[in-house]
């Protein structure tokens, strides 16, 4: 049994009011370029097709695959996320989205995407295997944390060793290996040619991150500054969800630009009254796009908010500034 995260390279055949012949020519040209390793040329061909047929699922899926191979993870995540929105009945985009999340160490997001893939197609073996690997990684992190808190815990030590042996390495990560192509069956149009599937590759070794322990989060030691910023934003959302107001407010800079020119203290008190004692709150971010310019970072994302009284989805932008080595929120805007 292979213990690693596997990418689905499925041939999705969905046409939007076009003849099978036109679809076959486009798919064949892009597929040939991709198989020949001419990735940039394939992208140009796909973009030309998408200019005429922006909803073409197969072209969009192939573009996501190519972007993944080019290590353009943020763009690939956007492609697969939008595919899940437009074609929620297809499991492969969810699976590939999970692979990208796992490669960034975002295992909770990866598990949620894989659960959606399985809900869409319960017989999708690739997603089941990947979900097991993600759960094993999460278990490894939890046992490791238990040992950090109590190094003499023999049960946690035994379980950690078992999980490490299960997933095949000494760090509890995911081994990047080439997998045999075995995409799950999906709905296709009869007699419609599809892009030939290519051997998939596994996701890269994910990085382990640790949740913040103080009011202002300690930044994780990772090389990619965008990952650091994303970790801060996710920890901010987690503090909000847990109604830990002190920790939540700790993610805001002292010069945070409050709405309506409120004083910092008045704004903080307003936020406290809106968060504390309000029953259950859930805040989740998705589809994050991050740009960094020196000590300033802009994060645009989709925010999912739920409470006992309200459920909403909105676009949000956070502008963060790096102060004393920590990323803190300086501006907060709603809307696209």
Image: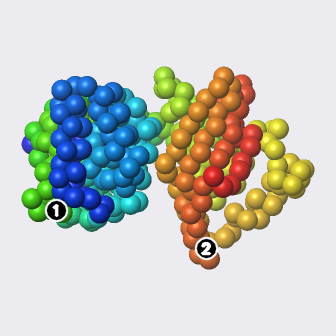
In this image, 298 relative to 225: left or right?
A: right
Q: Residue at x 18, y 34 (%)?
A: 32
**Residue 229 or 93: which is nearer the viewer?**
93
**Residue 219 or 293: which is nearer the viewer?**
293
Q: Where residue 121 sits in the image (x, y, percent)?
A: 21, 63
In this image, 150 relative to 325: left or right?
A: left
Secondary structure of the residue carrying numbered label 1: loop
Q: Which mark is residue 310?
A: 2
**Quadrant of the rendering where the N terminus is positioned:** top left
Q: Residue at x 82, y 49 (%)?
A: 258
Q: Which quadrant of the figure has residue 69?
A: top left
Q: Where residue 119 sits in the image (x, y, percent)?
A: 27, 65
Q: Where residue 205 sits in the image (x, y, percent)?
A: 31, 30
Q: Where residue 319 sits in the image (x, y, percent)?
A: 69, 39
**Residue 238 or 185: which is nearer the viewer?**
185
The residue that disc 1 covers is 189
Q: Which mark is residue 158?
A: none
Q: Which quadrant of the figure has residue 306?
A: bottom right
How many angstroms separate mark 2 from mark 1 (CA)? 41 Å
Secondary structure of the residue carrying numbered label 2: loop
Residue 172 in view here: no
């Amino acid at each position: 049994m292979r213990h690693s995260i596997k990418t689905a390279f499925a041939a999705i055949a969905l046409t939007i009011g076009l003849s099978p012949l036109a679809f076959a020519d486009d798919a064949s040209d892009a597929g040939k370029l991709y198989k020949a390793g001419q990735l940039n040329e394939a992208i140009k061909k796909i973009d030309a097709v998408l200019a005429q047929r922006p909803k073409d699922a197969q072209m969009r899926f192939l573009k996501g695959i190519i972007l993944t191979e080019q290590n353009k993870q943020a763009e690939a995540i956007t492609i697969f996320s939008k595919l899940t929105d437009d074609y929620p009945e297809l499991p492969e985009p969810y699976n590939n989205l999970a692979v990208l999340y796992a490669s960034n160490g975002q295992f909770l997001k990866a598990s949620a995407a894989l659960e959606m893939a399985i809900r869409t197609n319960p017989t999708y073996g690739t997603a089941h295997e990947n979900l097991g690997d993600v759960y094993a990684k999460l278990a490894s992190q939890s046992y490791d944390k238990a040992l950090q808190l109590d190094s003499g815990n023999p049960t946690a030590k035994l379980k950690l060793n078992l999980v490490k042996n299960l997933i095949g390495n000494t760090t509890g990560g995911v081994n990047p290996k080439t997998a045999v192509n075995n995409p799950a069956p999906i709905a296709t149009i009869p007699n419609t040619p599809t892009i030939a599937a290519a051997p998939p590759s596994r996701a890269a070794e994910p990085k382990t991150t640790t949740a913040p322990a103080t009011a202002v989060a300690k930044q994780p030691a990772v090389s990619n500054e965008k990952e650091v910023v994303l970790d801060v934003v996710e920890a901010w959302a987690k503090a909000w969800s847990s109604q830990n107001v002190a920790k939540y407010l700790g993610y805001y800079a002292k010069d945070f630009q409050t709405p309506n020119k409120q004083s910092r203290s008045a704004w903080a008190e307003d936020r406290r009254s809106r968060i504390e004692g309000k029953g259950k709150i859930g805040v989740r971010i998705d589809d994050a796009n991050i740009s960094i310019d020196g000590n300033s970072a802009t994060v645009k994302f989709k925010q999912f908010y739920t409470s006992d009284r309200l459920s909403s989805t909105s676009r949000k932008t956070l502008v963060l500034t790096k102060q004393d080595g920590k990323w803190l929120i300086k501006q907060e805007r709603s809307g696209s």
